[in-house]
Amino acid sequence: MKKLTLLLVFVLAIAMCAPAMAYELPLVSEPTTLSIWVAGAETVTDMDTNTLSLWLEEKTGVDVTWIHVPTEAETKFNLTISSGTYPDIYFKGFSADQALLYANNGIFLRLNDLIENNSVYYKDILEKEDLVRNSVTAEDGSIYTFFYSDVGVHMYCTDKMWVYEPWVQQYMDATGSEKPVTTDEFEQMLIYFRDNDMNGNGDASDEMPIVGVSSAWSGDPLAFLMNPYQLWNGNFLVAKDDTVSFIANTDEYREGLKYANRLYSEGLIDEATYVQDIDQMKPRITVTDPKDVTIGAFPAAHVPEYIDCNVFPDALVDYAPYEPLEGPTGLRQANYAGNMQVSLNTAITTTCEHPEVAFEFCDFLLGGEGGETHFWGFEGKLEDGGTFVWSDDPAVNGSVPSRVLTFNSGAMQNTFWGAPGPGPVYDSIELRYSETDVYGWYAWTHYRGHTTYEPYYTFIGLPQVSWCADEDLIIERNEQSILFNEYVKMCNTEFVLGVKDVNDDAVWEAYKAELEAMGLERYVEVNQIYYFGK
């Protein structure tokens, strides 16, 4: 069964009419060359002969010198910066701190005049979408980059728990219980997983209720287990009414740790969760026979994070998103980052000899024909240079006709790019899920996860991009963030595994005292200024 690429993972959730304007193509009337430095696109065999690359060059009339950097992009980017010799365009993601640094050092071009005078799509988006405008605009009103947006609904809340649905049904049938809702009910189901031959292979001892990869993206089960007690965020900061607070020392946080520790003590969370990596996890969970399934649940943003769905396609259906649990106080929530993920991406350098052409080339990818092609690729089978075919079957979102993608994720190819460049912003979330085939590009499992968690979304309160011109404060924050995050994560593991006794008041008070001694009050103050300027 075909596994589809993460090509589409960055569409913006905006339902807007296309701008009245459109580019007159080609963009240039005389030979013009741009050099574009491309980070990522690991599956592309040759950017120079890639179908999308050639199509863009033909459409725009621009001759592109592609500098493809599929691996070690950050290191190689830093080398180009230190060399003093820059490409015309960087197709790469940046933090606001980086954008300011390179702009202030005369490397990145300020785009405001180009947006005002040359834009067809970017200007229109900025006028209609507050989140994008606020994300890309520095405190002084300057804009230095384009952006990358992700309307993949799996990104709204990445901290999900996926439970093997056939086992849940077995538990319900055997016990006469309803599907567990509360933390205690969920615990009883996990105990049943532990004590019974759930996979029917004759061995009642090979089942492990929860296995994760704590070092991986959304791979720590503590996030899901904490939310019934304390709203989770991976950097241990949340905000309410623009006021930042630290969560990892609250009474509620302690109760969440107690719950996780109890599950571990009962043999319901695999100790390997805290030592293994994804490469070790995958062979444990990627199976071909239901009798080989030994893992009842795992935390992840989406199923393919751990499972090779080409080998185990039924995992996309059988591992179902489990609703957030209800805690002892009735709290039931899922940490929610917002309806779209926006980050800074793509910058034009000050050494570019054709900045207007460079801007329009990037802007072309944000909408219209350029955006649609950047997003979907080309109609037809892969061997014919295509990436999708039309179908009369309903799409994930119910629309007809729908697209069936025709390529395999992870396989080397030379038809599309994958991820680099601005946007793409073509239309809306409806377009993002106009794909069919439950075993396709995971759109179905993403959508399923979103609809399961959406009723419980609780906003973490922090902006996705923060502009701060105080370089000293940024340095201080970065150093503090490393210090606090590493310490809290270490203690989380020790509390869950029982190395530190979370039930011992003296141990808990010592943990809190250490946080204070590390400068917790100043850490919260610095983040308050960083995120909200006050």
Image (tube, rainbow, N blue to C red):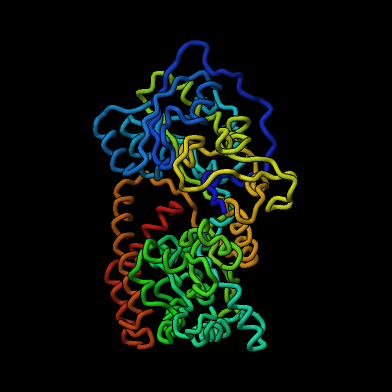
Is residue 338 visible to us here?
Answer: yes
Between 410 and 369, the one nearer to me in the picture: 410
Q: Along the horizontal axis of the image, is 68 left or right of 233?
A: left
Tell me the residue at 49%/66% (across/down). Answer: 287
Between 30 and 51, the one nearer to me in the picture: 51
Is residue 141 visible to us here?
Answer: no
Tell me the residue at 38%/22% (across/down). Answer: 352
- Please state the horizontal and vertical placement of residue 9, each as a whole percent of the image: 53, 47
Q: Is residue 384 above or below residue 459?
A: above
Residue 27 placement: quadrant: top right
- Please state the horizontal and vertical placement of residue 211, each as a whole percent of the image: 44, 73
- Please state the horizontal and vertical placement of residue 83, each as a whole percent of the image: 24, 31
Q: Along the horizontal axis of the image, is 88 left or right of 112?
A: left
Residue 215 placement: quadrant: bottom left
Tell me the residue at 62%/40% (across/down). Answer: 388
The quadrant of the rendering that contains the C terminus is: bottom left
Q: Is residue 480 above or below residue 269?
A: above
Q: Along the horizontal axis of the image, is 425 left or right of 417?
A: right
The quadrant of the rendering that contains the N terminus is: bottom right
Tell me the residue at 56%/80% (across/down). Answer: 327
